[in-house]
Amino acid sequence: QVQLVESGGGLVQHGGSLRLSCAASGRTFSNYHMGWFRQAPGKERDFVAAINRGGGSTVYVDSVKGRFTVSRDNAKNMVTLQMSSLKIEDTAVYYCAAAPGIWPPPGGAVAYVYWGQGTQVTVSS
């Protein structure tokens, strides 16, 4: 088991920044690729970004490229999502998740086996 706890969400104005953190405990954190997903009200959970086990490779959904940065610290069992130039459409509950296996994890959310409880990000105009 891997337990994941997100933090850092909140209310921010359009154009502002937030840094989300995800603390992991349990099984060896560095065995897992880590991803961030988000779910807006009435919508499906969508992929945002992911980082491989070693932290040397990342992928992003097109809508956040150049604005969001995912990173990890395997010594601290932590993954972060730095978000800047936030837009109203970034409003959602953000989840971190862990995936074993190949990189990048195939099939989107189904490849991720452990999930955090989510943290709310609200971007106001």
Image (cartoon, helix red, strand yellow):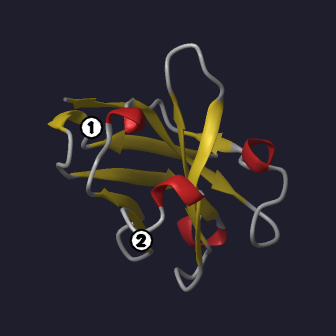
For disc 2, the marked residue is 71
The relative height of residue 118 versus residue 6 in the rendered view (above or below) is above
Q: Report the residue at 61% width, 75% height from top.
A: 53
Residue type (three-letter) at the residue carrying disc 1: Gly
Q: Earlier in the sequence, mark 2 or mark 1?
A: 1
How many callouts does the rendering have? Answer: 2
Q: Report the residue at 64% width, 65% height from top.
A: 32
Q: Position of residue 95 (x, y in %)?
A: 49, 39
For disc 1, the marked residue is 9
Q: Residues within 10 Å of mark 2 (few under 14, many from 20)?
A: many
Mark drawn on residue 1: none
Classify residue 24 as left or right of residue 100: left
Tag 2's secondary structure? strand
Cα separation, mark 2 vs mark 1, equals: 17 Å
Tag 1's secondary structure? loop
Q: Quadrant of residue 99?
A: bottom right
Q: Report the residue at 19% width, 29% height from top.
A: 125
Residue type (three-letter) at the residue carrying disc 2: Ser
Q: Report the residue at 73% width, 43% height from top.
A: 109
Nearest the eye: 50 or 97? 50
Nearest the eye: 2 or 99? 99
Nearest the eye: 58 or 61? 61
Q: Quadrant of residue 84?
A: bottom left
Residue 110 visible to the viewer = yes
Q: Position of residue 50 (x, y in %)?
A: 58, 62
Identify the residue at the far top of this view: 42
The relative height of residue 44 versus residue 7 in the rendered view (above or below) is above
Q: Residues within 10 Å of mark 1 (few under 14, many from 20)?
A: some
